[in-house]
Image (cartoon, rainbow, N blue to C red):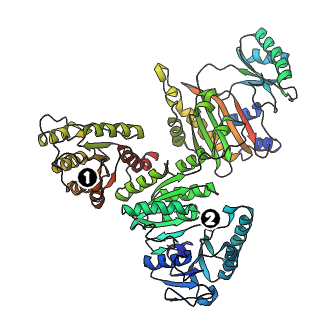
Amino acid sequence: MESSLDPFFNPRSIAVVGASAVPGKLSRIIMESLDRSGFAGEVYPVNPKYSEVMGRRCYPDIGSIGECVDLAVFAVPASAAVRLMKEASGRVRGAIVISGGFSETGREGRAAEEELKRAAKEGGVRVIGPNCMGIYDTVSSVDTLFVPEDRVRRPPKGSIAVLSQSGSFALTAMDELAVESIGVSRVVSYGNKIDVSEADCLEFLADDDATRAVVLYIEGINDGRRFVEAAKRCSEKKTLMALKVGRHGAGKRAASSHTGAIAGRYELYRAAFKKASIIELSGYEDIIDGCRALAANDPVDGRRVMIVTDGGGMGVGIADACSEVGLVVVPLPEEKKEVLRPVFPGYFTVNNPLDLTGSVTDEWFEKALSVALDGDDYDLAIVAALWGPPHLTDRLPERLAGAARSSGKPVIVCSPGGEYTRKRRALFEEAGLAVFSTPESAVRAASILLARGVQR
Amino acid sequence: MDNRIQELLKEKRGALIEPEVMEILSEYAITVPRSSVVKDLEGARKAAAAMGYPVVLKVVSRDILHKSEAGGVAVDLGDGAELEDAWNEMRSRLKERAPSADIEGFLVEEMVPRGVEVIVGALRDEQFGPAVMFGSGGTAVELFKDVSFRLAPVDREEALEMMRECRGYPLLTGFRGAQPCDVETVADVITKLSIIMCELDRLKELEINPLVAYPDGVVAVDARATLVGGE
């Protein structure tokens, strides 16, 4: 489908305006990022100071490229941005203005931003930014980030999109996701959003086959109603989660009613999130946990949870945390108890949570999980795997993953512990299971999976 | 929408007086107490006798938004003598506490029985447009903030969901052996308030506090409204 954001998400050619040959310069790092990301289209460095940058012919100005460029990345001082934007008119379809020094700096910056906006509008150029990081896109292989890859790792290809007003937030989240090999589809840092806003991106992502879930980091929204409409449409097909920061800022309105006195800015954001079926996240940890849960699982509509563990106390703690977020720890049905009793020693209490004790084996874990999830008694499971019991082997994660796959239901793993345990986290990740190191984070992740189903 | 209401709003500034707000609510079929506006004690007596005691007496003034604080509300007046006492007291209290207020009259209103008090409010936000709020806890609502917001308009399902999100919701469903209240009609009021905000774009804030819920219906006992651009 054709979209006005195609220059950003499916460009055929990219110009780097202000490209430098000097290692360490931001514009040079952007060239390196584009090289490394494997972008297949043409890359045109633009800078009158050089005739060549990183082995590519460098053009003195945008006009001399000779063809209309899909995407231009402006890595130039704010003072030059307006002039270059005028030059881009008719020669560039979309521009990412990395440069800071606009409305975020005060009155003069605001005036400069207005000028930039006008120039872009008159020239028919769509703009992301200014004051942003731009795009990291695994679908189109575009990486405009000006941070070196050895400082901030890029996540692999995946199905989670990240929309962030803050560039540093987007980077930090990406770096964390990369460590766990949680894949992303498209990451957009849109900064001061003089043109392309979160609503535009959501409209694009609604029809983007590569994206299954969207995470938003929001500082402030300008056109609330449009945002809600776009988000509503997108959340019909994808899972949307949002973190709104600046919740307790000065948002007091002059009010003559109780309603007005209570309604801070955040209450309205929350009302908007509910209207658009956006899962409300409460902080940074929520974002990472939510991505981890959603990368490995589809959201669920039901809230009946089975808890399987080899640590009785851990099971009870998880059951408590479940009740607090609205997950229901349904007792194990009698037929299933009968199936499971012969598997375990006679002294076992077969119920939910199911405690497999220190005598646990890989087989017991696998059997318990697959019997519990079979049929329609449960919507999801939380497995608390403690590595102390001596019979457990490193094959456990793969066996749990097998049981999870054949059930077709989400399985969240909680595996708290020290050195031995932490080294085994990767085994769960490699098996394709979402693994968490505390009961609270595992349950929070489970609640994010069901928040979508429950809101509706 | 009724043109009369649009006309009424067109010429107003600042805040509406209670009879005007009640008129809007009635127009949208939200139950309000029987009432009449009177100018003098004689009129108050006649109105009270016509609707039957006990009654409530309230001051009507665009300049007094918080009637109770100004001493402009007297409740549970059982007969003519109590009404007369309350009348005289109120007049002298208002002279003291709101000497410059332009008093348009007084409202004699039927005294509704006790029920479960909730608050249903609405406001117009500059970014998100009209929104509605449901809250429990009556007069303590600003303290406990047991409230839930949604962008308007909301449908019945959303309205019920807003109510269930409040900790005080069980008060409406038969807490400690009480008879359950008519939650469907409370939801209906939330929905209607959200529609009013969408249709009457001059309204900035609109609030029913309290809305008293009974096993068989609700009554909007007190209501206030302010207008956009009226400050």
Vertically, is B170 above or below A310?
Answer: above
Residue B53: x %, y % from top left: 71, 14
- Foreground residue, B218 or B61? B61
| Residue that numbered label 2 is attached to | A193
- Quadrant of the image occupied by residue A302: top left
Vertically, is A294 above or below B216?
Answer: below
Residue A195 falls left or right of residue A180: right
Which of label 2 and label 1 is nearer to you?
A: 1
The residue lying at 74 percent from left, 62 percent from top is A107
The residue lying at 42 percent from left, 49 percent from top is A448
Marks 2/1: CA distance?
47 Å
Residue kind at label 1, given as amino acid type: Tyr
Residue A332 falls left or right of residue A273: left
The residue lying at 53 percent from left, 39 percent from top is B162
Residue kind at label 2, given as amino acid type: Lys
**For numbered disc 2, what is the local secondary structure?**
loop
Q: Is residue A212 visible?
A: no
Which subunit holds the residue at mark 2? A
Q: Residues within 10 Å of mark 1 (few under 14, many from 20)?
A: few
The disc label shown at residue A420, or none: 1
CB contact under 8 Å: marks 2 and 1: no
**For numbered disc 1, what is the local secondary structure?**
helix
- Foreground residue, A419 or A324? A419
Which subunit holds the residue at mark 1? A
Residue A375 falls left or right of residue B144: left
Report how many numbered discs are placed on residues in the image: 2
